Image (cartoon, grey):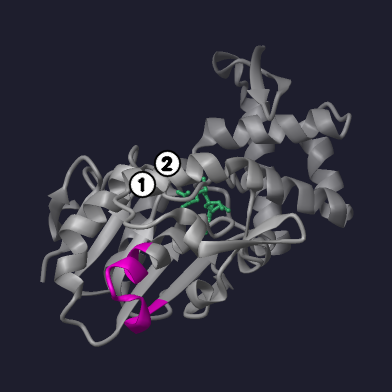
Amino acid sequence: MYNYNYQDRIIMVPASEDIDPLEQIEIELFLEALYRHCGFDFRNYVFQSIRRRIWHRIHAENLTTVSGLQEKVLHDRSVLNKILADFSINVTEMFRDPSFFLAFRQHVVPLLRDFDCIRIWHAGCSTGEEVYSMAILMHEEGLHHKTRYYATDMSAQVVEAAKQRALPIDRLQAYSSNYLLAGGTRSLSDYFSFQHGQAVIHPFLSEPILFAQHNLAVDHSFNEFHVIVCRNVMIYFNSALQNRVHGLFYDSLISSGFLGLGTRESIAYTSHSALYKEMDPIEKLYRKIG
Ligand SMILES: C[S@@+](CC[C@H](N)C(=O)[O-])C[C@H]1O[C@@H](n2cnc3c(N)ncnc32)[C@H](O)[C@@H]1O
């Protein structure tokens, strides 16, 4: 066994070298059952990461086996919702990795100016901080009025939360310094007001954003985009699923469109690596060839 700290709780997970064929079978059957029961497909997520979350839920429900959890998930809607929430890791922040947004401002924005209408897809948008950051950036660059944003996530709950435009007050200071490091030209406080003890993003920023549930593991392309931003999402996918998603993104980008990935993600070694040119290898900004 080894200990794993999950949301300040210590979870005991059988050590990876202990993974016996029975546990492997149980986890595969569990993921298959989940997929067939509710259409969420976690079969191609990184195995050890999904395994840790399964064990977290097993302990939280006072169970002892993956098969026991499977029975609960299939027959108790509330446990199903809990495991789906466990699998959707929602960590995000405004101007997360500020240097990414700075590089976007410097290298991509000048190439977007000539378009009459710009469509940006934020895939795996979590609670919306990433797309609101982009809307602020585009506003400051004078492009917000002609931009449409599509912010999607597999989780209906986080999509609903994103639509509320609320920012956690205890994070505002950190968000303000991110904003300045990202090349912000004003003050982050220009973009929200306090209402009922919450910081709420101004509606002019959310107005051109379409929030929707979309699952990268099973759903298809739904538009053509000038820019796709998918950060800190594919890190949880195995290479087969990463390749599927890169196929989806490639088909969804206009010719010479832009792709932005997370710091620990890359197009290298994927099925589509030869189809993009690197614009900024550190900030993981790519441009579709052709
Ligand atoms: C760690 S958050 C990243 C949020 C944001 N992109 C950022 O970098 O701050 C990962 C998000 O990806 C979403 N996600 C995970 N698997 C997904 C899938 N198959 N399809 C769509 N969204 C997914 C999760 O629900 C979660 O909200």
In the rendered image, residue 36, in percent from the top left (x then y), is placed at: 68, 60
What span is in magenta? 137-148
User: Residue drawn at (72%, 21%), measured in percent from left and top?
Assistant: 11
| CA distance separating discs 1 and 2 | 5 Å
Residue 177 can be seen in this image: yes
Q: Is residue 20 left or right of residue 173?
A: right
Q: Which mark is residue 180?
A: 1
Q: Which mark is residue 177?
A: 2
Q: Helix or strand or loop: what does disc 1 sit on?
A: helix
Marks 1 & 2, CB-CB < 8 Å contact: yes
Q: Helix or strand or loop: what does disc 2 sit on?
A: helix
Q: Quadrant of the N terminus?
A: top right
Q: Quadrant of residue 161?
A: bottom right
In the rendered image, residue 221, in percent from the top left (x then y), is placed at: 41, 75
Q: Quadrant of the C terminus?
A: bottom left
* In the image, residue 207 above or below residue 5: below
